[in-house]
Image (cartoon, grey):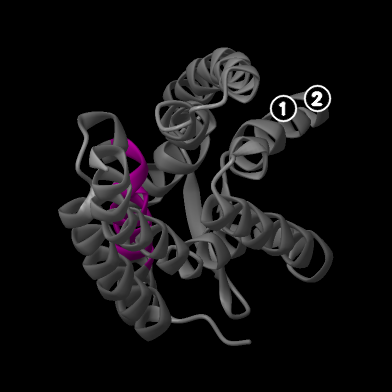
């Protein structure tokens, strides 16, 4: 599998369009964070596409560090808390929702830790084979990584919505493939896989919008 500027920018355009469509089908304010997930992936893939172009054409420039840290900020500081929050807001089952809020509390701590790490040790990036390697001279603690995986994967798997469980499965498969085949560039490849699964988010809202008039009609009769 080859990753490049074209792959990242094409994915950014695709996920951006999917995000706009998903938002257009969300009918409640509490659904907007979930519907916006593809747009966030689009931001990450845009940053990576621009990094590919910049590094391949010119080598390190003043744009490299900001772009690398935008990607890292979303990956390490946003996703751990945003993922459980976005799913919890749409979950109707009380027990599952409480579990998601517990994951959100853990994710908020990880997000704070990620922001501190970015401020203390900004990230750099270089091309490693067909992927981008991000590094800031420190390692992510194993216990924090386990909590990170739980916060970003479990909320979707716990959802009562079938489409969101499928998205969670895609994220887990991406995690496994990235860990086994692309360990040194793990975060970059995992985010690429997850972005590719964003179409499932659109499918979720498309089905919800189609089902709601039927549900309302049944309630009337």
Q: Mark 2 or 1, which is nearer the eye?
A: 1
At x 62%, y 51%, the residue is: 165
Query: x, y (%) of residue 98?
Result: 60, 15
**Front position in the image: 184 or 89:** 89
**Front position in the image: 15 or 72:** 15
Name the image quarter holding residue 142: top right
**Front position in the image: 118 or 113:** 113
Identify residue for label 1.
Answer: 147
Name the image quarter holding residue 59: bottom left
Name the disc covering residue 143, or none.
2
At x 37%, y 79%, the residue is: 5
Q: Is residue 98 left or right of residue 4?
A: right
Q: Is residue 138 left or right of residue 105?
A: right
Specify the segment rendered in magenta: 33-48
Packing grade of label 1 (10 A; few <14, some 14-19, many >=20) is some
Query: x, y (%) of residue 96?
Result: 63, 25
Compared with 144, 145 (above or below) is: below
The C terminus, quarter of image: top left
At x 22%, y 69%, the residue is: 17
Compared with 156, 142 (above or below) is: above
Dominant secondary structure of the magenta stretch? Answer: helix
Check contact, mark 2 vs mark 1: CB within 8 A: yes
For the question of whether residue 40 can be seen, the reply is yes
Q: How many marks?
A: 2
Compared with 67, 198 (above or below) is: below
């Amino acid at each position: 599998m080859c990753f490049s500027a074209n792959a990242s920018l094409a994915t950014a355009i695709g996920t951006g369009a999917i995000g706009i469509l998903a938002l257009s089908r969300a009918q409640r304010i509490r659904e907007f964070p979930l519907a916006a997930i593809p747009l966030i992936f689009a931001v990450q893939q845009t940053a990576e596409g621009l990094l590919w172009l910049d590094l391949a054409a010119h080598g390190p420039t003043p744009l490299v560090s900001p772009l690398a840290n935008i990607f890292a900020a979303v990956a390490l500081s946003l996703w751990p808390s945003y993922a459980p929050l976005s799913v919890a807001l749409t979950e109707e089952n009380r027990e599952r929702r409480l579990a998601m809020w517990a994951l959100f509390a853990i994710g908020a701590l990880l997000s704070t830790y990620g922001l501190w790490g970015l401020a203390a040790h900004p990230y750099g990036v270089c091309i490693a084979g067909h992927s981008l390697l991000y590094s800031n001279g420190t390692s992510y603690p194993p216990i924090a990584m386990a909590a990170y995986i739980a916060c970003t994967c479990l909320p979707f798997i716990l959802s009562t919505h079938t489409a969101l469980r499928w998205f969670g499965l895609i994220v887990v498969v991406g995690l496994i493939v990235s860990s086994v085949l692309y360990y040194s560039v793990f975060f970059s490849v995992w985010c690429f896989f997850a972005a590719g699964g964003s179409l499932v988010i659109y499918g979720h809202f498309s089905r919800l919008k189609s089902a709601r008039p039927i549900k309302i009609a049944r309630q009337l009769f």
